[in-house]
Amino acid sequence: MSDDEVLEVVVPVQEENIDFYSAALGKTVWNEITAGVGIWGAFRPIIAVTLSLIPFLFLGQHFNRNHRRGTDWFLLQIPLAFTLVLWVALYIWSVFDAWKDSSIIVSENS
């Protein structure tokens, strides 16, 4: 080979389907954000806690379809209202219990 000759090498480039990879990436990110249970499963405990933060009504229990427990705690708060410390303990326990029950419902459905 002399210096005047030029050797040209052509390497075929495989075109990647960008839409497929971006959709797969989006699906992976979505599953990581929602823990694989979907948007409703991810936000159900948050909604239960938000509703249970409304004092005196125990709506988080009713949201989780524990109507008996919500009614019992509503009636139990009447005598506990005389002792503010016990009422606050029941209120805080209600918030925790609504979150726990909602998380259990989500994990059983997934």
Image: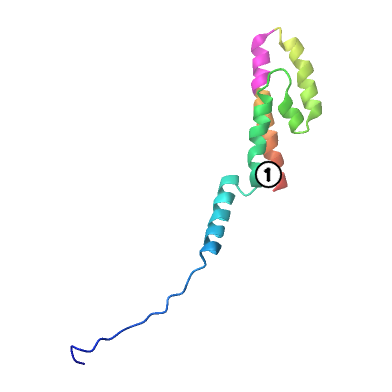
Question: Which quarter of the figure has residue 20?
Answer: bottom right
Position of 69 relative to 32 (above/below): above
* Image position, residue 48 (x, y; %): 68, 31
Q: Is residue 19 left or right of residue 89?
A: left
Query: Who's the residue at 78% across and 26% down the image?
Result: 69
Locate residue 68: give its quadrant: top right
x, y percent for residue 30: 58, 50
Q: Residue at x 73, y 26 (%)?
A: 59
Residue closest to the far front: 4
- Residue that badge 1 annotates: 107
Colour pattern: rainbow
Does residue 64 sit above or below 109 in this rendering?
Answer: above
Q: Secondary structure at mark 1?
A: helix
Q: Which residues are magenta?
A: 83-92
Residue 63 position, x and y percent, is 74, 31
Residue drawn where x is 43% and y is 75% of the image: 13
Q: Any magenta on residue 89?
A: yes
